[in-house]
Image: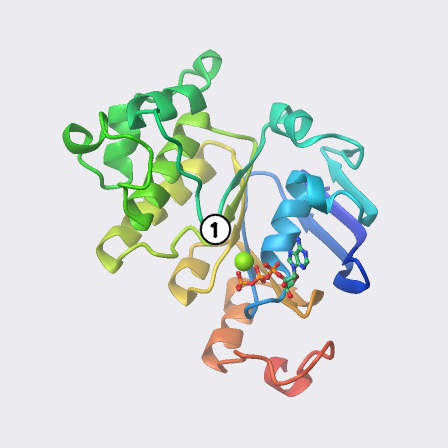
Amino acid sequence: MGIIELKQVSLSFEEQQILFELSMDFWEGHIHAVVGPNGAGKSTLAHTIMGLPDYRSHTGDILFAGKSIKELSIDERAKLGITLAWQEPARFNGIKVREFIRRAGDKSRGTKSPEEVLNMVGLDPGRYLDRDVDTTLSGGERKRIELASIVAMHPKVVLMDEPDSGVDIDAIQSIFDVLEWLKEHGTTVIMITHSGEVLKHADHAFLLCNGALVDKGTVEQLSSYFERKCVPCTHKNVPDEEALV
Ligand SMILES: Nc1ncnc2c1ncn2[C@@H]1O[C@H](COP(=O)(O)OP(=O)(O)OP(=O)(O)O)[C@@H](O)[C@H]1O
Ligand SMILES: [Mg+2]
């Protein structure tokens, strides 16, 4: 049994169907990758599991530890220990990096200090702790600060939407360090990625295409998707069988 289970989840916006009967199991303490071309529905899947307001009208069911969370609000899901790291993280005026990370931390579980988590993501605490979490931070810096806050939070399940996007090649190791730390500490990771390198750090992978699950399996199996460069898809709503065999 997965800690998060999707049962035939379909979602439409107005007339257009975006997700098609997705049934997926995400196992506890594993790193799962979700890959697929632009517009495949990967972010939509993450937003639906998190229960964002526009994404609550799906059919089918979503279970957390065997119980339906379909009727739960985003805050109620967050209280269960589910969190989402955005593809493009928000910035907040008037809050310092130190405070942002402290607020994310769960003291009851012995959280790491803001200094420790910044070091983990390769940012010098001396330079960043007193910066504002606002538009003066670059996209890559903001992304790494969000990753740092996730380590402090130590959630049960984290949905990471392209943790590597906008992060330079030197900093990519810090993402792997965070993934390893989360896995060692029992967090279930569901990460969306376009990177074959990041995919290698997953235990299991799913391939989405045009809102449908077209393949799942080991990282080795799904790596062929990158090797065969099945991007962008040349088809509409029909998996490209030849590219996947
Ligand atoms: N709130 C919304 N209203 C209408 N359409 C939406 C909404 N959110 C997503 N979509 C559409 O759903 C489809 C899937 O989008 P999604 O953002 O999930 O793709 P993605 O796989 O994350 O792509 P990318 O790799 O570019 O991030 C797209 O066609 C998008 O335009
Ligand atoms: Mg996306």
Q: Residue 238 at what x, y percent from top left?
A: 73, 79
Few, some or many residues within 10 Å of mark 1 (<14, 14–19, 20+): some
For the view shown, which residue lies furthest in the left direction? Answer: 126
Please report the residue visible at 40 percent of the width from the left and 32 percent of the height from the top.
Answer: 92
Residue 91 image-quadrant placement: top left
Please report the residue visible at 48 percent of the width from the left and 59 percent of the height from the top.
Answer: 193
| Amino acid type, residue under disc 1 in the picture | Gln
Q: Is residue 63 visible to the viewer in this orientation of the structure? A: yes
Q: Nearer the viewer, residue 229 or 144?
A: 144
Q: Nearer the viewer, residue 216 or 168?
A: 168
Q: Secondary structure at mark 1?
A: loop
Please report the residue visible at 80 percent of the width from the left and 46 percent of the height from the top.
Answer: 57
Give the labeled residue for mark 1. Answer: 87
Q: Nearer the viewer, residue 134 or 167?
A: 134
Q: Quadrant of the C terminus?
A: bottom right
Q: Residue 34 at what x, y percent from top left?
A: 57, 58
Query: Quick check: 113 left or right of 52?
Result: left
Residue 112 image-quadrant placement: top left
Total residue callouts: 1
Quadrant of the picture in which ligand 1 is shown: bottom right
Q: Is residue 2 visible to the viewer in this orientation of the structure? A: no
Ligand 2 within 8 A of label 1's CB? Answer: yes
Q: Residue 243 at what x, y percent from top left?
A: 60, 84
Query: Quick check: 177 left or right of 124?
Result: right
Query: Quick check: 105 left or right of 13?
Result: left
Q: Quadrant of the N terminus?
A: top right
In the figure, 109 relative to 220: above or below? Answer: above
Please report the residue visible at 28 percent of the width from the left and 30 percent of the height from the top.
Answer: 132
